[in-house]
Image (cartoon, grey):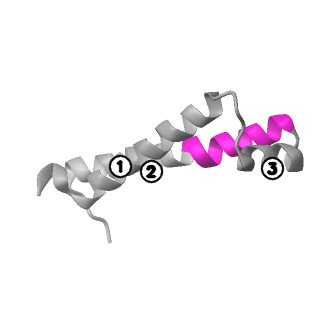
Amino acid sequence: MGFLDVNFIKAIFALYIVAISLIRLMYDKEYFRLTAMKKLFGRSLGLLIHFLSYVIMPLLFAIYFLCRGIVGFVPI
């Protein structure tokens, strides 16, 4: 099916998650999860964990699924 492969749709969804997470990180108002992580782990480590889990991981999944969607590679 070309670009309408399921992996391509997953890549678009992961990029959407990355965009929303980056917008939320740059927004002045902090969200509950970020505030909780900062209280639990401290400011620097809390921001790092939040950034890794809500931006970097979805971005890696987006790159992976985008490549699989374009190439059409389905490993077993």
Q: How many residues crowd around disc 2 within 10 Å: few (fewer than 14), some, or many (20 or more)?
A: some
Q: Is residue 37 above or below residue 47?
A: below
Q: Nearer the viewer, mark 1 or mark 3?
A: 3
| Residue type indicated by callout 3 | Ala
What's the residue at 63%, 49% (across, down)?
Answer: 53
Q: Which residue was labeled with disc 2?
A: 61
The disc label shown at residue 36, or none: 3
Q: Considering the numbered disc 1 on the image, is that residue within a helix, a strand or a loop?
A: helix
CA gap between label 1 and label 3 equals: 29 Å
- Quarter of the image for residue 4 reads bottom left
Q: Earlier in the sequence, mark 3 or mark 2?
A: 3
Callout 2–callout 1 Cβ contact below 8 Å: yes
Q: Considering the numbered disc 3 on the image, is that residue within a helix, a strand or a loop?
A: helix
Which quarter of the image is occupied by the C terminus? Answer: bottom left
Q: Considering the numbered disc 2 on the image, is that residue within a helix, a strand or a loop?
A: helix
Q: What predominant SS class does the magenta segment belong to?
A: helix
Q: Earlier in the sequence, mark 2 or mark 1?
A: 1
| Residue type indicated by callout 2 | Phe
Asked if residue 55 lies left or right of residue 32, the reply is: left
CA gap between label 3 and label 2 equals: 25 Å
Residue at far left of view: 1
Between 34 and 50, the one nearer to me in the picture: 34
Between 31 and 53, the one nearer to me in the picture: 31
Task: Identify the magenta region.
Answer: 43-56
Residue 73 on image: x %, y %: 24, 58
What's the residue at 48%, 37% (across, down)?
Answer: 19
| Residue type indicated by callout 1 | Ala
Q: Which residue was labeled with disc 1?
A: 11
Residue 52 on image: x %, y %: 64, 43
Q: Nearer the viewer, mark 3 or mark 2?
A: 3
Q: Earlier in the sequence, mark 1 or mark 3?
A: 1
